[in-house]
Image (cartoon, coloured by chain):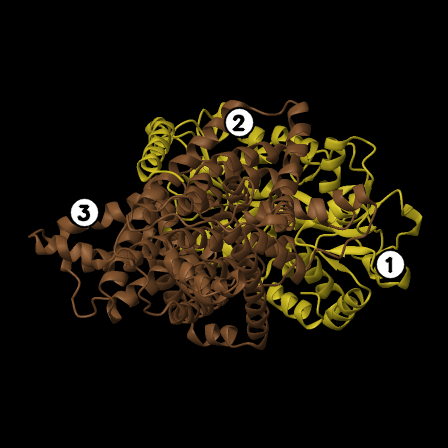
Chain colours: A brown, B yellow
Amino acid sequence: MARSRPAPVWLLAAGALVGAAAVLPAAYLAVVVFGDFSAALETALSSRALETLLRTAALTAAVVVASVALALPIGWLTVRTDLPGRRLWAVLCTLPLVIPSYVGAYLLVAALGPKGMVQHALGIELPSIYGFFGAWLVLTLFTYPLVLIPLRAALRRIDPQLEDAARAMGRGPLEVFRTVVLPQLWPVIAAGSLLVALFVISDFGAVSILRFDSFTAEIYIAYQSSFDRVAAAALGAVLVVAMLLLLVASSRVRGARRVHRLGPGTLRPTQPYRLGRWRWPALGFCSLVVLIAFVLPVGVLIYWANKGISTGSTSWNTIAALGGNSLLIAVWAAVAGAIAALVVAALVVRYPSRMTRAIERLAHAGYALPGILVALGLVFFATRAVPALYQTIALLVFAMTIHYLPLAIGPTASSLVQLSPRIEEAARGMGRGPAEVFRTITIPLARGGVMAGAALVFLHAMKELTVTLILSPIGFKTLATDIWTQTTYGFYEASAIPALVLLAVAAVPVYLLSEQGAAPP
Amino acid sequence: MSHPLSQRTRLLAALAAFAGLVLPAGCGFSTEDSGGGSNEPDVEGITLYSGRIPAAIGPAIDSYEAEANRDVQVRFAETADLAATLVEEGDASPADVFFAQEPGAIAAVAEAGLLAKLPRDILDRVPARYRDPDGRWVGITGRARVIAYNKDVVSESELPPSPFGLTAPKWKDRVGWSPASSSMQEYVTALRARYGDDRTGQWLEEMVDNGAVSFPDNVTIRDAIAKGEIDAGLINHYYVAQAIGEEGPDYPVAVYFPPGGLGSLMLLTSVGVLESSDRKPEAFAFVRSLLSDRSQAFFTSSSKEYPLAKGAKPDPSLSVPVDKIPVSDASLVDLKEIQGTIELMQESGAL
């Protein structure tokens, strides 16, 4: 790593701008908290807040461990073995990411809940899905692809010569994996786990439906029951602190490892491991995951959609208009998120310093907070500073971008880490300016990671609900807001069609993401 | 193993496809009809923040638009989220009217000093017990807290005269409630006002000890009763009427209005006009329209809620007369009381 070089001023300025934008919701929390500091402190330090924090930490840890436990074997099987149909399995195992957590929770309750469809069909009693277990299951199933995607990309990029050498020395496949492959994977596992952890602490949809009293649920209670903005902001501030601790922990694991190769082109295809008769349990494992995390929920949706269509209440023109609105927001958020993430990633990877690391941490602030706090923070600043932009598409896209920015930073940074700075230095040596090198060398070579990041932002912006309801232009509706409108009053059949359309559109970037692991960047 | 170029081609093709889909949408994004056709600021129109979903208010808006020849732009979201948004917006709010589904939300907005005093004629349209004593909001419809039950498992004669009876051993693990929902909290607040904190707290503890099952909201309780997860639950009456409307008369859930004491309780949905609005005359006209015979008839026939305007007739399916359902006194809308309720519910383990 080139530790000594200072970052170019223009890049630093752009990074500072991104950091300042992303920190707006947290700044709003600070404004409210310091408005009534003693009340805020009382809430944040109450034994109830502490208990909820511990409970949420336990859930977060459990989801992260389970996500890694799912992603590691799936990633290895679909990249490094001769598993039949491995590219299809890669897509199928990434697809659960398209299911919004609130929809996924409803669907799993419908399928696996007491007296649900599965119990009804099988005539057996399943363990209760409510509480810690259900929240853990749902959040794991619908977020583990956040670990799987970078993991597959990394498995592709790992130089196979080390493994070949280890194998030649007579080590078995498991030992090679543990001693050679796994150490190279820790950085991406840490990055993916961070995204999963931040998702879990900020999720409200799944935990409320599955009756798990998490920290975010507590924030919503503060708003919805006592309309206590100070208490809500105080709890939000605790989440920001928790986020910072997670970031520090994650960067410890990632460390300053030198994992880049000299550049693309030196990588030769690995010989896939032959699974032999192990292919049957491997196929069974992948099938089970896809069955529970994708086939089951989508099956319920299709069942409901069928009932909805037969009642003839579906307007395809409306659905198309909703889909267009969802796409509009998601595409612009993806583009803005990719650019902002590239700035942050370039700073932190190429010019590591206290300041660039601080910018990276600030950039995560909007992701750790539940949507309601992001939305209210922007309501607060926009109505005071830029009233002309309030409740416009521009502000909504801005909100989505800062809410989901970290999803794009991870993959972008990973691809930059793997790209040797010596290529950039060579270009500098040939007389090109830093901005030109960034444009002609860095961006094209990091394209795979940038696209993956953009796809992740796109996907989450498609599913987003709370921020859209509050900050969209008046009368603006998306597939997600339509699903909300229908399910609020329990019109599940009517909500199934927009939900299926949402899944179909969101599946496009998921396909790209799983291909991301199939070809070298 | 794919060649880098082919991946690049695929990515570019995907981008082009997205651009083709999105650019036309970007030229004129689509807005909901009942919320007004255009996104241009319309000096003639008003802006409504609605906690009520489109299906439950759309026709009432349409009839106002047709009669007054004005646009109504609507932002739909959760009532509590809208209340929080209004408080952050302060004087800069684009909203002229706020339609709250829960009494606490409108009280929060009123207490923040954001609601204008309503004209006398609007206040006079509604009996005094269904409006703010300070005249900043009026009730539009009422929802009764009731016991919903699965009629295949429970007969009405088995049900107790008030929810106090649900702590009996025979109801162990069979009853659902929603301690985190505002409607349940309003109900507990009313119990505290009538019976005191000790008796109410004791009931809450006994409910918890008796295995009352916590749900996030009324709909999930209703669906759990229909599926047989639980046999009875404390919910708002109209959710069941809606399901019967959708599923037909074989729907297994029925409602029971407990006759004793505060067995049932009327909760109000209500409307206020923002002090910051510069279109108050139009906003007041809209509130009058919501209280008109036509809109009141729409609310009661479509959502099976009680109409609250003087002289409005409840839907024939509402067999319990409106004046048989008690309303809590003004303490119901005092936020400090709700805070006390939450503390009591937390102490008793309900929340």
Give the residue type that dot 1 points to: Trp
Q: Nearer the viewer, residue A320 or A386?
A: A320
Q: Which residue is mark 1?
A: B171
Q: In which quarter of the view is residue B4 placed?
A: top left
Q: Which residue is mark 2?
A: B62
Task: Please tell me whether mark 3 or mark 2 is closer to you in this view.
Answer: 3
Gap between marks 2 and 1, in whole Å?
46 Å
Is the residue marked by circle 1 packed among few (<14), some (14-19), or many (20+) residues within 10 Å? some
Give the residue type that dot 3 points to: Arg
- The residue at the point 47 percent across, 76 percent down is A41
Gap between marks 3 and 2, in whole Å?
54 Å
Task: Please tell me whether mark 2 or mark 1 is closer to you in this view.
Answer: 1
Give the residue type that dot 2 points to: Asp
Query: Does residue B151 appear left or right of residue A431 in this picture?
Result: right
- Residue B264 is at least partly visible in this image: no
At mark 2, the secondary structure is helix
Query: Does residue A425 appear left or right of residue B37 in this picture?
Result: left
**Residue found at the very far left of the displayed protein:** A431
- The residue at the point 35 percent across, 63 percent down is A27
